[in-house]
Amino acid sequence: MINEKNIPSTYAEAGIDLLVEARILKKINEYVRKTFSFGEVVSKENHYANMIKLGDYGLAMASDGVGTKILVALSARKYDTVGIDCVAMNVNDLLSMGILPKAFVDYLAVSDLDEEIIEEIIKGVYKGCEIAKIPLLGGELATIPEMLAKRSDAFDLAGTALGIIPLNKVIDGSRIQVGDIVLGISSSGIHSNGFTIARKVLGVKYELSEELPWGKTLENELLIPTRIYTDAIEELLCKCDVHGLAHITGSGLKKLFRITNYGFELKQVPQPHEIFEEIRELGNISYQEMYSVFNMGIGFVVVIPKKETEKALGLLKKFYETQIIGKIVENPDISIPQYNVIFSR
């Protein structure tokens, strides 16, 4: 528990300043771009993954971890779901360019060689690979007690997903047009972003074992694995014309800025999941802040030409709840009128 006077109402107050992070990432990307001269890189500024050209194909990689969701797993002593999150965070980024994943490797750092905990973690990685239909080619197990000294069961988990795609099949947003329809595919919950503020806000009122108003315990709600969208997006790409794809993770719906310079008028976003409303109300957090941190119930976004709407909805609804959430507009902002949210570039 934390003192109510210290309840954060913004991500910055929780310890994550997204403006500072953006400045740091800009500096990092300057060095990243300098390395492109060392290989034949196919890239688009600020998209989800860059690729190396291999003849008529692009070889792409995405790397990510699970973040402070691991602290919830540690406190709950439940380790078998964060591996799914790790696979999902990487695979979904590849899918955002129309790239189907082909393989995965992981990096697991532990403070102590606890066989049972490590096996539980890897069970989750296996489950994630099973859902994504990719092999786990190996990885690294590092024992670093001096770096993870606060507790003997501490660990960190990250991974890298590999994908390959014909260069003429890449979905990079360049075909997005004004009037295109924006579909939102539901998330399973918080996924793996925003836990730094979520833990601090929810911890004021609830212990992890306590039941939330809708019947789940807090730990079970927070540890719902990130949804993996491979099957849905694979079928969509096979049967529909797709102009844009976006994995909604850190920075929330502002992730849509990555895929086009056009704007998004989102007049039909779904009612946020109960967990997001609980966080918002407890922390007295604005919708502007909530939609810039959390997925708010939309885990993946698809942009299609209007003529494909009925077909795409029919396909995606076979997998997950999906709805029209808006359209592409000339104005470069992202607007969510029902919550008075506007994001500008």
Image: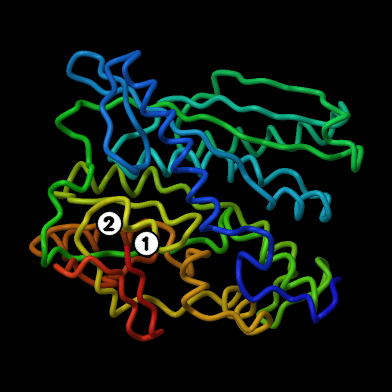
Q: Secondary structure at mark 2?
A: strand
In terms of depth relative to the viewer, which is nearer, 287 or 327?
Answer: 287
The quadrant in which residue 37 appears is top left
292, above or below 147, in the image: below
**Disc number for residue 269:** none
Marks 2/1 in contact by CB < 8 Å: the verdict is: yes
What percent of the width, then of the height, locates residue 50? 34, 31
Q: Give the residue pinned by disc 1.
A: 185
The quadrant in which residue 209 appears is bottom right
On screen, residue 232 versus residue 25, left or right, reads: left
Task: Please tell me which of labels 2 and 1 falls first in the chain.
Answer: 1
What's the residue type where badge 1 is placed? Ile
In terms of depth relative to the viewer, which is nearer, 87 or 260?
Answer: 260
5, above or below 112, in the image: below
Q: Residue at x 54, y 51 (%)?
A: 21
Around disc 2, counting alpha carbons within 10 Å, would you say few (fewer than 14), some (14 to 19), or many (20 or more)?
Answer: many
Q: Residue at x 76, y 51 (%)?
A: 71
Q: Give the residue pinned by disc 2.
A: 302
What percent of the width, then of the height, locates residue 24? 52, 44
What percent of the width, then of the height, locates residue 108? 70, 29
Q: Secondary structure at mark 1?
A: strand
On screen, residue 166 versus residue 145, left or right, reads: left
